Image: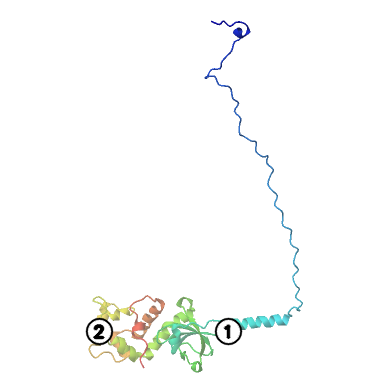
């Protein structure tokens, strides 16, 4: 048996255990970022030198040239104007003068075929109210009127024209009484079970209409005078009032102006 003594025996030798771990220092991978340096400067574009416009060495147009240019422009505009639109007055041949205004040189006339009021340029200041004038397309025959100015409206007529319109219409009916006797007074019949055609005339009721039918009989009326005497009415005046009412009110039905016109030759 060997006994150890001395220095080697007294020395304490510590053997590390498996469970003991040496402290390790954790090194970080973080690296400081690069300090901000600011926005990179963009180089500015160098301004372009101003370009000088070439001078026009031509002399300016004089005042006369400007005026001539304006005249040419006006002539071109007149040539480019649209043609006049057609109106119902283009179909009229004859009309009755309602008004002849000497201040404006405008004639208001009532067309015989459609009972339409038209405005015409006046050629003759002596044309009288009620006169029958030619308003057809043949300009060589137009001795009283010139161009067609357009339709005339009832609400824009003068007081004199408004009062003369029924009288001129009555004159037209009296001059063509044979036509209206044959086309209306001698053939007028019931419009419905409750209304007779004679009741379209102002002031004629159902009783008066039946009386007129009885007086007319089978032979009919021969003239306006005989009709007026036998029925105690003014037939031309009543029919003229009906025509004027239809001129004023375009919605009035039935329209005798469309049923009885134009006057047959």
Q: Residue 75, how many percent across, how many down? A: 61, 83
Is residue 167 visible in the rendered image? The answer is yes
Q: Secondary structure at mark 1?
A: helix
Residue 164 appears in the picture as rendered: no
Tell me what residue is drawn at x 63 percent, y 7 percent: 7
Image point 33% across, 88% down: which residue?
180
Q: What is the number of callouts on the image?
A: 2
Question: Can you tell which quarter of the image residue 105 is in?
Answer: bottom right
**From mark 2 to mark 1, how far is it between C-alphas?**
62 Å
Q: In the shown orientation, is residue 246 left or right of residue 11?
A: left
Q: Residue at x 49, y 94 (%)?
A: 141
Q: Earlier in the sequence, mark 2 or mark 1?
A: 1
Q: Between residue 203 and residue 60, name the one nearer to us.
A: 60
Q: Of residues 100 and 159, which is closer to you in this image?
A: 100
Q: Position of residue 113 (x, y in %)?
A: 40, 87
In this orientation, which residue lies closer to the viewer: 206 or 122? 122
As drawn, which residue projects farthest toward the front? 1
- Please give the label number shown on residue 213: 2
Label 1 neighbour load within 10 Å: few <14, some 14-19, many 20+: few
Q: Quadrant of residue 35?
A: top right
Q: Is residue 6 left or right of residue 230?
A: right
Residue, disc 1? 79
Residue 44 in which image quadrant: bottom right
Which secondary structure lies at badge 2? helix
């Amino acid at each position: 048996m060997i006994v150890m003594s001395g220095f080697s025996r007294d020395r304490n030798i510590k053997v590390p255990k498996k469970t003991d771990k040496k402290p390790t220092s954790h090194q970080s991978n973080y690296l400081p970022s690069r300090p901000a340096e600011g926005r990179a400067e963009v180089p500015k574009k160098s301004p372009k030198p101003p370009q000088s416009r070439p001078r026009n060495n031509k002399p300016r147009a004089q005042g006369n040239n400007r005026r001539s240019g304006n005249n040419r422009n006006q002539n071109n505009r007149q040539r480019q104007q649209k043609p006049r639109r057609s109106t119902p007055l283009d179909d009229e041949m004859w009309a009755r003068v309602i008004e002849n205004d000497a201040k404006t040189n405008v004639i208001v006339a009532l067309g015989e075929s459609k009972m339409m009021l038209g405005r015409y340029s006046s050629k003759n200041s002596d044309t009288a109210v009620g006169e029958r004038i030619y308003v057809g397309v043949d300009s060589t025959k137009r001795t009283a009127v010139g161009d067609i100015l357009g339709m005339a409206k009832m609400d824009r007529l003068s007081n004199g024209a408004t009062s003369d319109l029924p009288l001129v219409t009555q004159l037209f009916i009296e001059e063509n009484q044979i036509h209206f006797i044959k086309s209306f007074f001698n053939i007028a019949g019931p419009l419905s079970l409750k209304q007779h055609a004679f009741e379209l005339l102002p002031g004629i009721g159902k009783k008066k209409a039946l009386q007129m039918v009885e007086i007319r009989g089978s032979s009919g009326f021969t003239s306006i005078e005989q009709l007026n005497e036998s029925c105690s009415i003014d037939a031309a005046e009543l029919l003229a009032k009906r025509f004027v009412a239809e001129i004023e009110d375009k919605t009035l039905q039935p329209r005798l102006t469309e049923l009885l016109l134009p006057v047959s030759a």
